[in-house]
Image: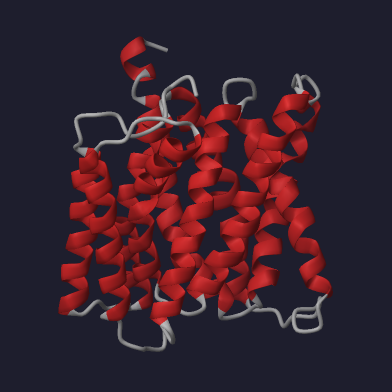
Amino acid sequence: MPEKYRSLLPTICLIMAMLLWASSFVALKIAFQGYHPMQVIFGRMFIASLCFVVFIPSFRKVNWRRQDIKYLLIMGISEPCLYFIFEAKALALTSASQAGMITAMLPLLVAILAWSWLKERISRQSIAGFFLAIIGACWLSLASETSLNAPNPLLGNFYEFIAMVFAAIYTVSLKHLTTNYPALFLTAFQAFIGSIFFFPFLLLPDVGWDFNWNGTASFAVIYLGTMITFGAYGCYNYGVSLIPASRAAGYVNLIPVFSVVLGMVILGDKLNLWQWFACALVFGGVWLSSSSGKSSGLSATS
């Protein structure tokens, strides 16, 4: 492949991942209308695991390192396990558009985590941008109006923020692991550990195995397992393996744009005037942080 096209590969993969992830908010809202959230999450992880079965023979060649086990567990427990729990709670209470807006804070959370965990430098401008985005996210939640798609947006947006914290932990751990493990293996590891983690939830009385077949919701679960857990995570993990994690996390800023548009077109989500101002504040904070002269993210060798 020519070098000029090779350099575009991570960009293409990451844009595709962001578009698919934005659609996952809509797909989850649809799936939750037919099935219990834990049934949906286990279903998507199990379907994704089936997609990876054919790659198991190639995974036998992976050179496991004992010192990486803790990072693999941190990555897998952070996302999909804890991340999906809080995202499921979030989308049961807030709209897909608002949840998507909260994801704009992920690059800033990655920068903060890299500063505190890896002792990397972060500028005052980045810190100012972080707090500006926090204020915007809080404003977005407080200005929310209760609706059929968002019965408790304040609590739902808070749960989505917690999900982003675990997503940041996942990103830092993933970047560390991509120096020794292929992206496909790391994506499969997430799917398998997610299936194991969420299986016991089916044994709970309020979840259970029994469910009434719902064609639309079932299609959404299949879409989540194949296009999101298998496809989007595969694209993202591959992109992170090629460029610094801070740059990869910056592409997350595309998710709010995609999710707002998809939420409005497919689910009929609406934002009031004050929420649009809050969205502008979030984007302003993200821009302020990302335009800082000093690097605030992970290095390519971390």
Examine the rendered structure and indicate whether residue 130 appears above or below residue 145. above
Q: Nearer the viewer, residue 19 or 252?
A: 252
Q: Measured along the vertical axis of the image, is residue 98 above or below residue 224?
A: below
Please tell me in which quadrant of the rendered image residue 204 appears. Answer: bottom right
Which residue is situated farthest in the top direction here?
Answer: 2
Indicate left or right for 232 with 121 as reference.
Answer: right
Instruction: Report how many numbered discs are placed on residues in the image.
Output: 0
Residue 51 lies, in percent from the top left, at: 70, 44
Q: Residue 173 location, x and y as percent?
A: 57, 36
Residue drawn at x 44%, y 36% is 114
Residue 269 located left or right of residue 148: left
Res. 12 visible in picture: no
Q: Would residue 145 be seen by someone viewing this image from the given angle?
A: yes
Q: Residue at x 34, y 31 (%)?
A: 121
The one of 4 and 159 positioned closer to us in this rendering: 159
Please, is residue 72 above or below residue 143 in the view?
Answer: above
What residue is at 65 percent from the left and 59 percent from the top? Answer: 44
Color encoding of the figure: secondary structure
Can you give x and y, in whole percent of width and height, for residue 206 in the image?
75, 84
Q: Is residue 180 shown left or right of residue 103?
A: right
Tell me the quarter of the image containing the N terminus.
Answer: top left
Identify the residue shown where x is 40% and y is 70%: 96
Q: Position of residue 49 (x, y in %)?
A: 73, 47
